[in-house]
């Protein structure tokens, strides 16, 4: 029950659920940072996987990832914004789209549980609590490397897809730069990603409203009908994209966000 993968929620979530929801992160995150005082690079402090659970707070990069994952799972707009560091207007718009999608997904899951019960809803939304708990626990298995005000966390060999992810310390707390979600992408691709996220949020809100209204007798029937509706919506959207791409000049310049 997902639209095609895009930069925002996908990049955060697959990393955390195996990480948690969909696409790989930037591969350039393991670079060292020069020490501005000495002019030389200080060796990073590496925290290997640990059997002890890292606290879900912003005092460490792994703790920050837990805070972000929990916020996304709950559709907590304030929590998401607290973790992601925004440095430009387009990055703010990116986070707005991520928040909208996370909120819509949470509304959909909540509607299914209220309408069909916790067990019945699993046929439609799966066991989101168990999946989230597993994702949180896997963060403890990741390697954390800290160098001054910068850090990365990365999965251990065999832990699943995903590369390193950057963090930066801001006012004493570890945060995720919004630029991490769109590394190497130009403005056109970023705006398309935001459009995709907002489109997905609209679908999830529509389906949540349908479930709440009592339109479906069972979660199974809801799932069958929603899959059909989503397939039609995505095919229509793809056709619109293809028509739009065909009408654009083939030599349009590529620009990057300021």
Image: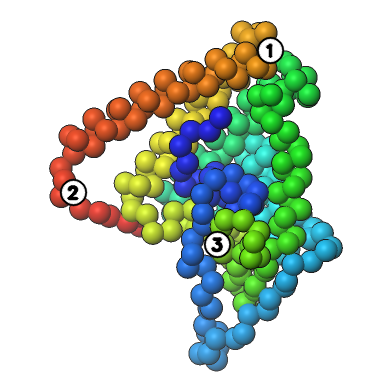
- Residue at 47% of width from left, 68% of height from top? 28
Mark 2 — residue?
252
Q: Around disc 2, counting alpha carbons within 10 Å, would you say few (fewer than 14), some (14 to 19), or many (20 or more)?
A: few
Callout 1 secondary element: loop
Q: Nearer the viewer, residue 205 or 171?
A: 205
Q: Around disc 1, counting alpha carbons within 10 Å, would you say few (fewer than 14), some (14 to 19), or many (20 or more)?
A: some
Measured along the vertical axis of the image, is residue 171 above or below residue 201? Answer: below
Callout 2 secondary element: loop
Quarter of the rendering containing residue 182: bottom left
- Residue at 76% of width from left, 53% of height from top? 137
Mark-to-mark CA distance, 3 and 2 = 31 Å
Mark 3 — residue?
163
Mark-to-mark CA distance, 2 and 1 = 49 Å
Name the image quarter holding the N terminus.
Answer: top right
Foreground: disc 2 or disc 1: 1
Name the image quarter holding the C terminus.
Answer: bottom left
Horizontal side of 250 relative to 211 (left or right) equals left
Mark 1 — residue?
218
Callout 3 secondary element: loop
Q: Earlier in the sequence, mark 3 or mark 2?
A: 3
Mark-to-mark CA distance, 1 and 3 = 40 Å
Quarter of the rendering containing residue 183: bottom left
Is the C-beta separation of discs 2 and 1 under 8 Å?
no
Regarding residue 156, the answer to whether it shows in the image is yes
User: In the rendering, at what x and y percent does residue 237 appear?
Assistant: 36, 27
Horizontal side of 62 relative to 154 (left or right) equals right
Q: Which mark is residue 14?
A: none
Q: Earlier in the sequence, mark 2 or mark 1?
A: 1
Q: Earlier in the sequence, mark 1 or mark 3?
A: 3
User: In the rendering, at what x and y percent does residue 88 appear?
Assistant: 44, 54
- Residue at 62% of width from left, 85% of height from top? 43
User: In the rendering, at what x and y percent does residue 123 appear?
Assistant: 69, 24
């Amino acid at each position: 029950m997902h639209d095609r993968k895009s930069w925002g929620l996908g990049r955060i979530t697959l990393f955390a659920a195996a990480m948690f929801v969909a696409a790989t992160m930037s591969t350039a995150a393991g670079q060292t940072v020069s020490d501005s005082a000495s002019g030389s690079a200080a060796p990073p402090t590496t925290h290997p996987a640990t059997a002890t659970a890292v606290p879900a707070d912003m005092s460490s990069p792994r703790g920050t990832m837990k805070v972000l994952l929990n916020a996304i799972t709950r559709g907590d707009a304030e929590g998401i914004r607290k973790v992601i560091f925004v440095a430009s207007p387009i990055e703010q718009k990116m986070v707005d789209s991520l928040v909208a999608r996370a909120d819509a997904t949470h509304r959909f899951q909540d509607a299914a549980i209220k309408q069909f019960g916790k067990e019945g809803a699993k046929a439609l939304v799966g066991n989101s609590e168990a999946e989230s708990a597993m994702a949180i626990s896997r963060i403890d298995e990741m390697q954390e490397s800290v160098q001054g005000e910068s850090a990365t966390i990365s999965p251990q060999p065999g832990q699943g897809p995903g590369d390193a992810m950057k963090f930066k310390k801001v006012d004493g707390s570890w945060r995720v730069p919004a630029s991490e979600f769109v590394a190497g992408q130009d403005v056109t691709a970023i705006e398309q990603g935001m459009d995709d996220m907002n489109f997905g949020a609209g679908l999830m809100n529509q389906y949540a409203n349908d479930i709440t209204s009592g339109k479906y007798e069972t979660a199974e029937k809801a799932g069958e009908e929603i899959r059909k509706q989503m397939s039609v919506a995505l095919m229509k959207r793809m056709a619109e994209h293809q028509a739009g791409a065909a009408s654009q000049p083939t030599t349009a310049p590529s620009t990057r966000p300021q």
